[in-house]
Image (cartoon, rainbow, N blue to C red):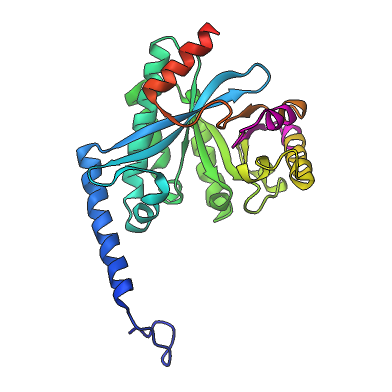
Amino acid sequence: MAGSEGRKNYRFYTSAMNDEVQQRVRIEGELTNALKNREFFLFYQPLIRIHDRKMVGMEALIRWQHPERGLLAPYEFLTVAEETGLINSIGDWVLRQACQDTADLHRDGYGDIIVSVNLAASQFRDALLPKTISEILDEKRVESRWLDLEITESILMENTDQVIKTLRHLKALGVTLSVDDFGTGYSSLSYLKRFPVDRLKVDRSFVQDIPSDRNDVEITAAIIAMSHKLNLQVVAEGVETAEQFEFLQQNVCDICQGYMFSEPVPIDKLRQYLDEQKNS
């Protein structure tokens, strides 16, 4: 039992709670080994420029090829990685691998492709983040304009003065900065004037019910219009149907991603996608 909630409050540990603790300890050890044994790899989902349907970027999405459990999606292990402090090491690996794959694409003549990488909250709070990113860009010989860093709304609102300082350091490197899952948190366009960001990513929860849900239609149209007034690009997530794409096209959204064009795929299949696009 535990008295952390007050002198007269008790909580009894159950076998299920003990099992949960043991499972987290086990996963922590497995994650450490996964980094050493190179069990992580990246999938990429194309980012499509809406006006001509050309692939102009890709979002890097981590996967874990577990030796016993098979292919694991991020939701199955990243929470534990965050709680145990391993997320920064994993995040650094993602940045390095994404930059390496991007450099290879450019070297092989696939055009001016940008790679988007999600930053975890603890990564963003790391005072050494700008230095780390600068070193990775130099190491992989990647131009800073080819890297797009995605940050959630909740991170932006944690400590505004420190956030602005970190964002300015990152912008000084020349990278692109995006606000991910826009609309799920504070959803205030006014605060964006204070942050040196370049893109908003409209959350898929707004896109998925277009055009049937009138509220989502109006909200998404308003986000696009006001973002453009602030000179921000807009990326729509979760585009799956021709009707959704047509709506975004009519409202002059800049970029989209979703299963209508491609699910997340390994780098070799992404190259095939680019080859097919060239030949179409």
Give coordinates of residue 234: x percent, y percent. Answer: 66, 33
Q: Nearer the viewer, residue 188 or 258?
A: 258
Give coordinates of residue 85: x percent, y percent. Answer: 33, 54
Magenta highlight on residue 24: no
- Residue 140 can be seen in this image: yes
Please report the bounds of the magenta region as a residue range: 226-247
Magenta highlight on residue 243: yes
Residue at (25, 65) in percent of width and height: 22
Give coordinates of residue 149: x percent, y percent. Answer: 50, 36
- Residue 203 can be seen in this image: no
Relative to 61, 250 lies left or right: right
Q: Nearer the viewer, residue 33 or 118?
A: 33
Q: Quarter of the image holding residue 219?
A: top right
Give coordinates of residue 99: x percent, y percent. Answer: 39, 27
- Quadrant in which the N terminus appears: bottom left
Residue at (35, 24) in percent of width and height: 100
Q: Nearer the viewer, residue 42 or 94?
A: 42
Q: Quarter of the image holding residue 13?
A: bottom left
- Quadrant in which the C terminus appears: top right
**Is residue 82 depicted above or below 113 in this figure?**
below
Relative to 134, 150 lies left or right: right
Q: Nearer the viewer, residue 159 or 248?
A: 248
Residue at (28, 61) in percent of width and height: 23
Q: Residue furthest top?
A: 279
